[in-house]
Amino acid sequence: MARIVRIAGAQLGPIQKADTRAATLERLIALLRQSHARGAELVVFPELALTTFFPRWTIDDERELDSYFEREIPGPDTQALFDEARRLKLGFYLGYAELAREAGTLRRYNSAVLVGREGRILGKYRKVHLPGHTAPQPGMRYQQLEKRYFEYGNLGFPVWRAFGGIVGMAICNDRRWVETFRVMGMKGVELVLIGYNSAAYDPNRAEDREGAELRTFHSRLAAQAGAYQNATWVVAIAKAGVEDGAGLIGGSCIVDPQGRIVAEAKTLADEVIYADCDLDACAHGKEKMFNFAAHRRPEHYRIICERAGAWVPEGKESW
């Protein structure tokens, strides 16, 4: 008997700096209801789904910075989303900025939670691969300051038994790193949920060598490769459009375990995509081409964990 889960991807259009949390939450709830109307059991929202992508701004006032963070999930500003999801019996993935107190110290993370159909938080993930800089870059109108505002995730890449299968999470830049998928693949993952906010172009350079089309291609390529090479479903959902002058790609998609896109967004606005995801379809790849126990040779992969950067020695013909 097939294990089919109808999954909705709730792409968000831009959230402007001036938009209130209440107005944004109304949009999330509207997407939740649209997903329910289409028979979804699980909804995937983007990274930092409650606010604009604030790491593009230099923020020196700590109170202003903390205004973008959630001290608790659910909290006063987000309880309505949890309540509506519980009423509709809909699970969801939500990306947000987390302000956590650990060992007496306040720490900031780029986080996501997985919520079950009864409204209970099943798991939390904190972004591991932070892009950008720790200090503002001179002459840049828009910054990328994730390394300044967030700490590296400290939860690893866990998976959970949920929605009839084995579910993992990642956030934005994590999807570009093969290690993200492989660690979860080694744990038998069957469904990877990813929210992202990815620049559509580089507004700080007159000649952008990439542009929205190539960046969207790379985003989908990463999701497709991760799905195929680990025989898992991947749901990658964007925040898209122009936020206060800075563009974000769309390209939200649902990818099957063969690496095929089975649903994709057509706009840069609020939009729901969905697919019936048969988790049993993961078995073919896991038992044949990507049967890790039969084919992996970890004795040759040690360099991956021993070293962060590439090293090219001088004067050697091979190494």
Image (cartoon, rainbow, N blue to C red):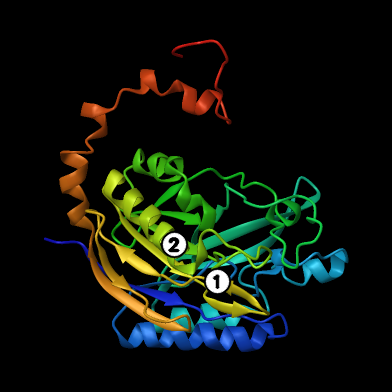
Amino acid type shown at disc 1: Leu
| Disc assigned to residue 248 | 1
Q: CA distance from mark 1 to mark 2?
A: 13 Å
Amino acid type shown at disc 2: Leu
Quarter of the picture containing the N terminus is bottom left
Count of picture labels: 2
- Residue farthest toward the left in the current orientation of the protein: 1
Can you give x and y, in whole percent of width and height, for residue 54 in the image?
Answer: 70, 69
Label 1 element class: strand
Compared across the picture, whether 181 is left or right of 16 comes to left
Asked if residue 300 is positioned above or below residue 276 in the image, the reply reads above
Residue shown at 56% from the left, 26% from the top: 307
Quickly name the residue at label 2: 214
User: If you read the primary sequence from the N terminus, does the residue marked by circle 1 or circle 2 appear first?
Assistant: 2
Can residue 151 be seen from the camera position used here? Answer: yes
Q: Nearer the viewer, residue 91 or 306?
A: 306
Residue shown at 28% from the left, 27% from the top: 296
Q: Residues within 10 Å of mark 2 (few under 14, many from 20)?
A: few
Compared across the picture, whether 213 is left or right of 70 comes to left
